[in-house]
Each structure stands twice: as structure tokens, then as C-alpha cells.
Image: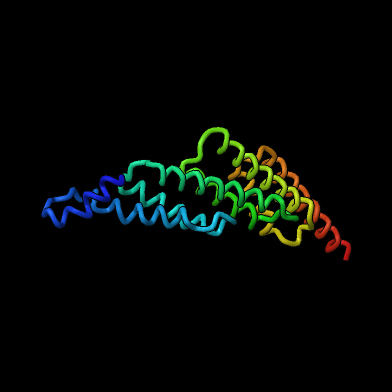
């Protein structure tokens, strides 16, 4: 890749034709290097990292040291973000949806194998906790309960269907009690 950068720099002077795909590489390498120069803290830079990686994939940039380092940083950001959410008190559907989006980004930036499986398991635990929090809360917010059930099913939480059945039973019991109260009055 450094050779391609130098060749492009001198191609104009030599009046040489440069293949079209090589023309896109140097600016993208600059974008990759700029993304690597971003502060390493937090997950806020994950979209920028993902954008640079996606662009590199689109133009078939060879996976040199800079791109590999960028992929590793993006994967680490994804794991750090999910760990940060897991460390916070409370589990709600918003957290689950956010972490599922981060999981998708992790897959898109090349996370595979046990690292991806570990991250997926963390998201499943978060979805399971949010589902149980919603199911054990009052039935006053059915949208939250429904969203938690859908997210848990999407995250492949094994107890999602059983929890949905339990919530449905609670709703039926509440409806029967309400109907009985109306009949008595």
C-alpha cells in the first residue's frame, strides 16, 4: 500500500495511467489512519471506525496493517460498549437494542469465532435480564414488555417464549379479574 501511495503521487508527473481502483486507495488510507488516531476511550468513535472499514471493503482495499489495526480497534470498542452497558444498573429494551446494534457492527467489522460468541452471549444475558425485568414489572407498560420479548427473541434468548407465555397468563388473569369486577358492579 505505501508503494501504491507513492506511485499515485508521481503518476501525474510521469503522465502515467493509474488503474481507477488504485486512485481511491490513498484517500481511504488517510481516512483509516485518521480513524486510528482517534482517542481509544469509549464507544463514540465506533460509527467512524465502521464507516472507514465499510468503505475499505467497498473498494477492495487490501487488509494491510493499518486496516487490520482499525478492525481490531472497532471490535474492542464494540466489546467495551457492551461491557459498559452490562455494568450499568437496570436493563431496559433501549439498552438491549443498542447492544444488538453494536453486535451487528462487530460482525460487520470482522469479529468472528469465540470473541463474537462471547459478545453474543453478553447481549443475550442483557436481553434476558431486560425481559425478566419487564415481565416482573407491572403490566402498566405493555409496549415495553412487548419490545423486551421481541428483542429477547431476536437475541435468541432461550426463555423468551416461556416468558411471553407467562406475561400472557398475567394479562389474561388481569382481564378476567377486571371482567369479574365489572360483573359484580
161 displayed left or right of 60: right
Q: Position of residue 132 (x, y in %)?
A: 74, 48
150 displayed left or right of 47: right
- In the depicted structure, whether residue 58 falls above or below residue 140: above
Q: Position of residue 178 (x, y in %)?
A: 81, 60
Q: Residue at x 75, y 45 (%)?
A: 166
| Near-viewer residue (150 or 172) | 150
118 displayed left or right of 73: right
Q: Residue at x 41, y 53 (%)?
A: 33
Rendering colour mode: rainbow
Query: Which quadrant is home to the N terminus?
Result: top left
Q: Position of residue 144 (x, y in %)?
A: 68, 58
Q: Residue at x 22, y 55 (%)?
A: 9
| Number of numbered discs | 0
Residue extending furthest toward the right: 184
Residue extending furthest toward the bottom: 185
| Near-viewer residue (115 or 181) | 115
Residue extending furthest toward the top: 113
164 displayed left or right of 39: right
Query: Which quadrant is home to the C terminus?
Result: bottom right
Q: Position of residue 143 (x, y in %)?
A: 66, 59
| Near-viewer residue (8 or 117) | 8
Amino acid at each position: 500500500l505505501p508503494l501504491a501511495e507513492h506511485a499515485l503521487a508521481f503518476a501525474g508527473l510521469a503522465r502515467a495511467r493509474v488503474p481507477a481502483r488504485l486512485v481511491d486507495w490513498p484517500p481511504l488510507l488517510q481516512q483509516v489512519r485518521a480513524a486510528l488516531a482517534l482517542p481509544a476511550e469509549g464507544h463514540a468513535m465506533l460509527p467512524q471506525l465502521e464507516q472507514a472499514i465499510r468503505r475499505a471493503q467497498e473498494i477492495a482495499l487490501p487488509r494491510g496493517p493499518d486496516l487490520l489495526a482499525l478492525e481490531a480497534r472497532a471490535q474492542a470498542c464494540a466489546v467495551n460498549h457492551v461491557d459498559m452497558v452490562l455494568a450499568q444498573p437496570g436493563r431496559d429494551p433501549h439498552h438491549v437494542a443498542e447492544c444488538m446494534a453494536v453486535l451487528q457492527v462487530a460482525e460487520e467489522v470482522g469479529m468472528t469465532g469465540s470473541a463474537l460468541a462471547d459478545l453474543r452471549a453478553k447481549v443475550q444475558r442483557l436481553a434476558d435480564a431486560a425481559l425478566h425485568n419487564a415481565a416482573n414489572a407491572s403490566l402498566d407498560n405493555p409496549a415495553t414488555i412487548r419490545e423486551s420479548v421481541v428483542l429477547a427473541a431476536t437475541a435468541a434468548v432461550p426463555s423468551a417464549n416461556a416468558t411471553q407465555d407467562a406475561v400472557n397468563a398475567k394479562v389474561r388473569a388481569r382481564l378476567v379479574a377486571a371482567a369479574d369486577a365489572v360483573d359484580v358492579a
